[in-house]
Amino acid sequence: MSPALFPQHVIAKKRDGGALTREEIESFVRGATDGSWADYQLSAMLMAIFLRGLTAAETVDYTRAMMHSGRVADLSGVKRPKADKHSTGGVGDNISLHLAPMVAACGVAVPMISGRGLGHTGGTLDKLESIPGFSVNLPLAGYQAQLERIGLCLIGQTAELAPADKKLYALRDVTGTVECIPLICGSILSKKLAEGTDVLVGDVKYGRGAFMKDQAKARELASALVAVAAAMGTPMRAVLTAMEEPLGRAVGNALEVAESIACLRGEGPADTMAVTFALGEQMLLLAKVAQTAAEARAQLEAVIADGGALRKFREMVAAQGGDARVVDEPGRLPQAKMQVPLAAPRAGFVEDVDALGVALAALRLGAGRAKAEDRIDPAVGVNGLVKIGERIATGAPLCVIHANDEQALAEAAVLLAKAITVGDVPGVAPRLIGEIIG
Ligand code: URA
C-alpha cells in the first residue's frame, strides 16, 4: 500500500477540506467492501465527507466505486429498452407496484431492485411480500432471466450488488451521516445503476412525510442525482413531488397492494394516478418509446383500459411464486382481525391529513419497522383515508383502521384523530407535482 493510501492519510486529507483523487476514493470504498478499513476509520471518513462535502467529480468517482464494489447485472439479453424509477420514499407510496407493470406493458423492460422500509412504513419489498408466496429473493441470474422472458422483475438488493453501500449505509445510520447529498447520491445510484437499467426516473419527495422535509433540499438532491447519473452515462430525470398528506387512501402493506390492483383496473385514487402518470411519462420518454408526454400518457392509459397492465402484474406475481389469484380476489391478501372505522368528530371539511402522523399510527399498528430487525405485520394499516379538502358528515369514517391488537388499535386511533383535522374551511393540498429536473 502506498503511504498516501493509508486510511488515516485519506481521512485527514478530507478532514482538512482537500479533494480526493479517484484512487483515494476507490481505496475507501474497497476498504468498506473487503474490511481493510476498520469501522472507526470508515465512520471518521463518512463524517469528514459529511462536514466537508464532495466535489461533483469526487461524487462521480465515489458512485462509480460503490457501483463496482459488487456485481453489475448483465442485461444485454434483454432486447427492449430498460427503464426504472426510484422514489426517495413517502407515506402510502405504492407507485412502483402498479407503475412497473404499466410501463412493462408499454414495451419497456423494468429492472427494479428495491429496498425495504427504513422509515415508518414498509418499502416496496415488504408490500410485495404481503402477496402469499411472492419471493423478492431472486439471485441475479434469475432476475436477468425473468427480465428477458417477461420484461419485468422486482427484487430485493442481493448481497452481490453494491455491497459497499450496505456497509456504509449501516454506519451512516448510527453516526449521524445520513443527510448528506453526495453520500445519498452514491448510495442510491450505485444500487440503481448496478441493476442494469438504461435510463432512470427519480421521484424526489419533500414535505412532512418525506425523507427531505424541504423543497429546496429536494431540488438540490434531484439535481445532484441527475448530474451524477448523466456523468456515468445513464440519462435520468427527476420529478419533485409533495408528501404532505399520504399518497392515495391506503397506508399498510397488503392494503397498498390492494390499492395498486385498483390502480391497474383504472380505479386508483386521483393523486396516486397523477404521480404515476407523471413518472410513467418520463420513463417512456427517456426510453424513447414515446415522443411527447401526451403520447406517453395515452400509451399508459391504453394499457390500463385494455387490461394489459393488469395481465403484466399477474404474470410477474406468478413468475415470482406469488398467488396470482389475489389480482381478482384481493380478499386472499392478509386480512387483519379488526377493521374499525374512525368516526369524524363533527361535520365539515378535511382541513389537514398529516402524512407523518398517519405513518406513526401505521407504525404503531405494526405496518412498519422502528428498528431494522422488527417484523412487519402485512395485514395492518389504514384504508379509506379521507383527502384534504373533502366534505365530511358527523360520524362518517375518516378512515378504516385494520389492526391485530386491541392496544395498538386504541393508540393508533388517538394518533389518527390527531393527524386528521376537520374544520369549517376546506383544506387545500399543496401542489402535488412540482418541477421536472433533467
Ligand atoms: N436511500 C438510499 O438508498 N440511500 C440513502 O443514502 C438515502 C436514501
Image: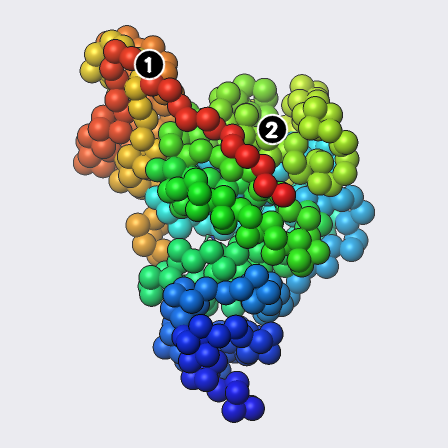
- Foreground: disc 1 or disc 2: 1
In front: 389, or 332?
389
Rendering quarter of residue 138: bottom right
Name the side, left or right, on which 285 lies relative to 95: right
Q: Label 1 sits on what residue type?
A: Pro
Residue at x-position 38% and y-position 37%: 207
Tag 2: Cα neighbours inside 10 Å, few (<14), some, or many (≥20)? many
Q: Give the spatial CA distance, label 1 vs label 2.
A: 26 Å
Residue 426: image tag: 1
Q: Is residue 405 above or below residue 391?
A: below
In front: 305, or 223?
223
Residue occupied by mark 2: 277
Secondary structure found at label 2: helix
Q: Is residue 314 above or below residue 55?
A: above
Residue 39 makes an appearance in the image: no
- Residue 246: percent from left, percent from top: 39, 31
- Residue 179: percent from left, percent from top: 40, 55
